[in-house]
Image (cartoon, rainbow, N blue to C red):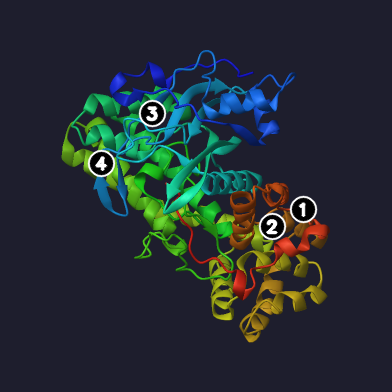
Amino acid sequence: MFPPFTLRYARLPERFYAHFEPVPVREPHLIAFNRPLAEALGFDLAAFDAEEAAVWFSGNVVPRGAEPLAQAYAGHQFGGFVPQLGDGRAVLLGEVTDRDGRLRDIQLKGAGRTPFSRGGDGRAPLGPVLREYLVSEAMHALGIPTTRALAAVTTGERVVRGIPEPGAILTRVAASHIRVGTFQYFAARGDVEGVRELADHAIERHYPELTKREGGERYLGLLEAVQARQAALIAKWMGVGFIHGVMNTDNTSISGETIDFGPCAFMEQYEPQMVFSSIDEGGRYAYANQPWIAQWNLARLAETLLPLIDDDSDRAVERATELLQRYPEQHESEWLEMMRAKLGLQQAQPGDKALIEALLAAMHRGRADFTLTFRRLAEAAESDKAEASLVALFERPEEISGWFEEWRQRLAQEPLPEGERTRRMRLTNPAFIPRNHRVQQALTAAMDENDFGPFETLLEIVTRPYDDQPERVEYTLPAEPTERVFRTFCGT
């Protein structure tokens, strides 16, 4: 069933990981399978059997050619450094080459207590598995780089997170699971050669254009490439109101993908300082802080690469600092390009940033829904009559009414005809996101009633985010006061 494994990471020195066989579960049952992704990965689905698939995706049987391992890494968690973290419940089976020639990790999450478990049980509750499945697939459909969900199985066992909950295992697919924290693991041990081997591996896998560079230029180039991808990634998060919740360095991927969907959420009412994570008491990872936390995490990556950038430590610091100082401009450039598209603007003009910020300020004061505001803006670009439905989103309509005239004057300077502009805006401003209350409803039905219908319905909806889906219009609406979810949980 599985395509051939290549085992690139397993061929690195053994201090990079711990060999670990998944711990069998009592009664695996397949509850979700991403057939399009499986086909893209090269799985043989001609004789697909759900019972057999449950055995594979639970880890009860290790696929031929796989060499399961738990990866070592460290990380800054809410600003505090932990020198050893590692995969406490995740097992990398190996890498496969997909039909487009790209290398992809296949990992089982919740597969048992590894040598890095730090006292944990190595298992995953059903709720967080379904949340990651829903949100990661929604992110992919939104066009945002992300890990993917290939399958989910229930285990027939209970895990305890305050109260006993159904257990589950997620099969996750990623460009790789190399993190900033992976580099920190070796740097914290003074293992410069380990940092070098990891950097060379990351370059070969994600940035092969850098293999032609020599010496410090190669590793400075790695920092530069990772920084560019992070600047673009965070701008895309900001464009859909996504709040990651735990932007620790061990949750920052070198490949530029969104990884580790724990206490994540999509913002409804626009509030720059919004926090949903139950553990982010100080608001470190609030929505508006995400671009600058990414820069902070990049600085931690830079610290690990300094001995490779230049033998002269002062010169290495100078070169890395000069590069990091470009990040705000890089992120703003990505953010402005994304926000122009959301407003129907194709050409850059000096006043665009002020126009965008004026809209966001009006949304904040008017307590408007982030997703609906931009979706209805696409409709208002084509028809003055559609303005009323947009204005109705604002508790204080006067906040937005004065902005329209300035926006329309700006649109008049664009070459696109209205119909084409609206079409493009609809492909930039989603109608559907995994709204928190809908996610919670799906999780509750699955956990409490063994009813996966709401999960399947929501998954179908959020993986078509730009379609109108008039029969599902209720899923575009924010939560009623009694339905609001203000806290999300990590699930570990």
Measure the C-alpha gap from mark 4 to mark 2.
40 Å
At 53% across and 58% down in the image, what residue appears? Answer: 265
Which numbered disc flags the more N-terminal residue, 1 or 4? 4
Q: Residues within 10 Å of mark 2 (few under 14, many from 20)?
A: many
How many numbered tags mark residues here?
A: 4
Q: Which numbered mark, 4 or 3, is in the foreground of this view?
A: 3
For the question of whether residue 207 can be seen, the reply is no
Residue type beneath disc 4: Glu
Q: Residues within 10 Å of mark 1 (few under 14, many from 20)?
A: some
Question: Which residue in the protein does label 2 denote?
Answer: 432
Determine which residue is flagged by label 1.
467
Residue occupying the point 56% across, 42% down: 145
Q: Residue at label 4?
A: 303
Q: Locate residue 273 relative to residue 45 in the image: left or right.
A: left
Going by the numbered disc 1, the residue's amino acid type is Asp
Label 4 sits on a secondary structure element that is: helix
Residue occupying image coordinates x 33% and y 52%:
296
Q: Nearer the viewer, residue 432 or 325?
A: 432
Residue 338 position in % (x across, y down)? 59, 55
Marks 3 and 2, how far apart at CA: 36 Å
Secondary structure found at label 2: loop
Q: Tell me if label 2 and label 1 are in contact, CB under 8 Å.
A: yes
Find residue 482 and report its horizontal and vertical position in percent: 60, 73
Give the quarter of the image for residue 98. top right
Chain-order first, disc 4 or disc 3: 3
Q: Residue at x 66, y 35 (%)?
A: 34
| Residue 211: mark | none
Left or right for 193, reference 239 = left
